[in-house]
Image (tube, rainbow, N blue to C red):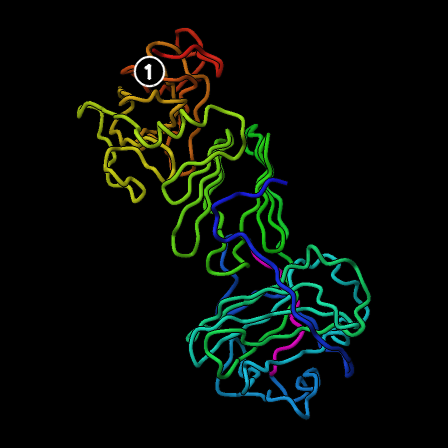
Amino acid sequence: MRRLLGISTLLLAAASGCATNAPAPTAAVEVAPRKPRPVVGLVDVKLSRLLDFESDADLTFVRDRMTSTAQRDATTAGEGKASLRVVSGQQGVKLKLATLLTGRQFPGSWTLVGLQARSPGGDAVLRLSLCDASGKTLTSRAIPINADNWDWAWLDLTGVAAQAVDGLELRASIESGSRGTLLVDTVALGDNARTFPPIDGSPVKVSLKGLHWTVQLQDASLQIASPESGADGYLRQSFDPYRCIFTTRAGAALVIESRGRIYEGGTCKPATTNGPWDAIAAQHARPGRIEIDEAFGRVERTSSGDRDNDGYDESRGSYRVAVHGSRARLTLSPDGPPLVEPLLEIRGMPPGDAVVTVEGRLVEKCVRLSDGTLLVEIPSTIGRPTTVDVRIDARSATAASPGQSLPSSASDVR
């Protein structure tokens, strides 16, 4: 499987040893939404709560209780009325999961295991590990946690083999940063597995499982960090037949096109080795000009991803215009490098079927997005100033438009 290079949120696993043991009565299991800090993202996570530290009985599940620095704290909580205060965050706490999971298959259909955490003494890095009865680390990772807010810290169970629950232990400790108190709340299993079918014939398949999205293109399979991986994980913003758009909580965008172009942080990179990538990179660096007569509309020069205010949005790899009627004519002009199958975003067109032609030749496919924007891929390479006409017709685009068809294999415009 090819991994997407340059994405800082790809996850790295590390190992850390643990110990064992297990007793006590089985805690009630509940599936419900969390508060006050739900999992961030458009895809819900089904939860099975294991511990919430609302009563002293929950301390039974703290390993080495007599020598542990952990105690209940009724003054703060991620949810509910109490949490577990670990006085020595560096020493950490070991939580016995075996009895809580009695009678269950593990991991079964669950894709995540984790807890809510906070480091009141200052921002820190939490080491969270899952260990089996022999002390072997099954999965472990370092996770940034916040001084002021409760955050979910998750481990990915998708690579953990099915096994007996006897002796399972979840360990949390502060690895770096603030070495003071560690606060722990709700311990839970999570299931975030989702599959998104292709849209309108798109070859792209998208799935979410554990700490990763998987984006399957025709010639590549890419993995990027899911929302549950942390602050830099990607949320699903929108999927359409041409592209998948993801954003982080901070608003950083990642665009993966069905044709294999990836836009991240204003840069363009290939998902595969197939394609005219030198020409595409040159076009991205020098996108030329898009022009439209004021009678039809205006070039959108102020989108957040348009670093040069020229109408080309580097964060999305598209030329953007806004129109104010049912007809528009615009011109694409290269500035040195030819424009390889440029993508247009046209806002403001009224409802109806869109007919798009490039110098009289019909563009067979355009997509109307949910916000009304028309997304048009010009299926040719443009080497000189080229006119694109767009109009809305109440009839079907094919029936309403004369002219020669311009399939994806059409000749270049030179």
Give the answer, above or below, for where 253 lies relative to 36.
above
Q: Secondary structure at mark 1?
A: loop
Q: Nearer the viewer, residue 220 or 238?
A: 220
Q: Nearer the viewer, residue 236 or 296?
A: 236
Give the answer, above or below, for where 53 lies relative to 216.
below
Please give left or right for residue 178 compared with residue 372 in the image: right
For the C terminus, the quadrant is top left
Q: Nearer the viewer, residue 139 or 46?
A: 139
* Range of magenta residues: 44-53
Give the answer, above or below, for where 62 lies relative to 397.
below
Give the answer, above or below, for where 385 lies relative to 342.
above
Q: Overall secondary structure of the magenta stretch?
A: strand
Residue 404 painted magenta: no
For the N terminus, the quadrant is top right
Please give left or right for residue 7 compared with residue 382 in the image: right
| Quarter of the figure with residue 148 | bottom left
- Number of numbered discs present? 1
| Quarter of the figure with residue 292 | top left
Residue 393 image offset from top left, x and y in percent: 36, 19
Residue 355 image offset from top left, x and y in percent: 38, 18
- State the residue position of label 1: 383
Residue 332 visible within the image? no
Residue 337 image offset from top left, x and y in percent: 33, 22
Determine the residue positioned at 56% across, 84% down.
Answer: 86
Determine the residue positioned at 23% across, 24% down.
Answer: 291
